[in-house]
Image (cartoon, rainbow, N blue to C red):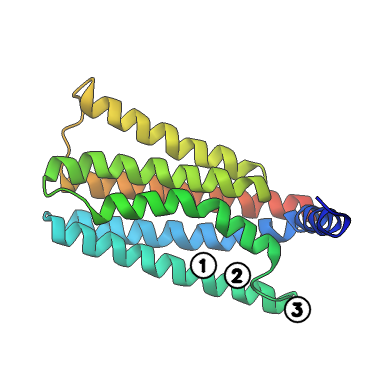
Amino acid sequence: MNEAAAQQQLQTIRTLMERVALYRRALAPMMLAAGTLGLVAASVGWFVPLETATGFFALWLLTAAVVIVTCFLLIRRQAIVDAEPFWTPPTRRVAMAAFPAAFVAAMVTLFKGESEIWIAGGLLCVWLVCHGLALHAAGFFMPRGIRWFGWGFVLFGIGLAVAIKVFPVYEPSFHKAHLVMGVTFGLGHLAYGLYLRATGRESAK
């Protein structure tokens, strides 16, 4: 590595360290928004109910798209407030770290089977684990707590897979899958967003 590349790497590391507080401020509203949207989607799936593969995918893929757009707008607003460009080198590193797990989840979803048991059971576990891995990978450039949050999704997804396969105490169905999504993606993100907001206020005093 030449001197110029080493200096650029060092500057990126310094920038990441300086922006931990900024990422923490941006994360709280993102998590709160994701959690709220997740709970709304789970409520729709639970009470309507949506008991078909088409309905399940339409609901949750639409929810994922809305969450992504909402988070993009929140990050963009934070960048404008701080008078900074949106697509900075640290932001690229976070996106690149999370991309592999997100790509795996997308590919598995694209080539999904038609079985209700697979979609409401196996695919749901894949979503949970991949989401946790993406959070954990991004956490190396963000506050440390998000890595533990990611581990929570990974362990829950693995535990659900064990409950389905090894100890058949959970019989997959779309009705139950909506509930699991509401608890994990909805309540999980909402709780972490509230935690970030509470601890952010304390650290700011």
Mark 1 vs 2: CB contact within 8 A: yes
How far, Cα to Cα, is label 1 from label 2?
6 Å
Q: Which residue is mark 1?
A: 71
Q: Amino acid at mark 3?
A: Ala
Closer-to-camera residue (117/199): 117
How far, Cα to Cα, is label 1 from label 3?
18 Å
Q: Amino acid at mark 2?
A: Ile
Percent across and percent down for residue 81 are: 71, 77
Closer-to-camera residue (111/51): 111
Q: Which residue is mark 3?
A: 83
Closer-to-camera residue (202/154): 154
Q: Amino acid at mark 1?
A: Cys
Q: Is residue 132 left or right of residue 182?
A: right
Q: Secondary structure at mark 3?
A: loop
**Quarter-wise, where is residue 18 in the image?**
bottom right
| Residue 11, above or below 148 | below
* Residue depicted at 57% across the width and 63% down the height: 29
Which comes sooner in the sequence, label 1 or label 3?
1
Mark 1 vs 3: CB contact within 8 A: no
Which comes sooner in the sequence, label 2 or label 3?
2
Q: Which residue is mark 2?
A: 75
* Residue depicted at 39% across the width and 45% down the height: 184
Q: Secondary structure at mark 2?
A: helix
Q: Is residue 171 left or right of residue 203?
A: left
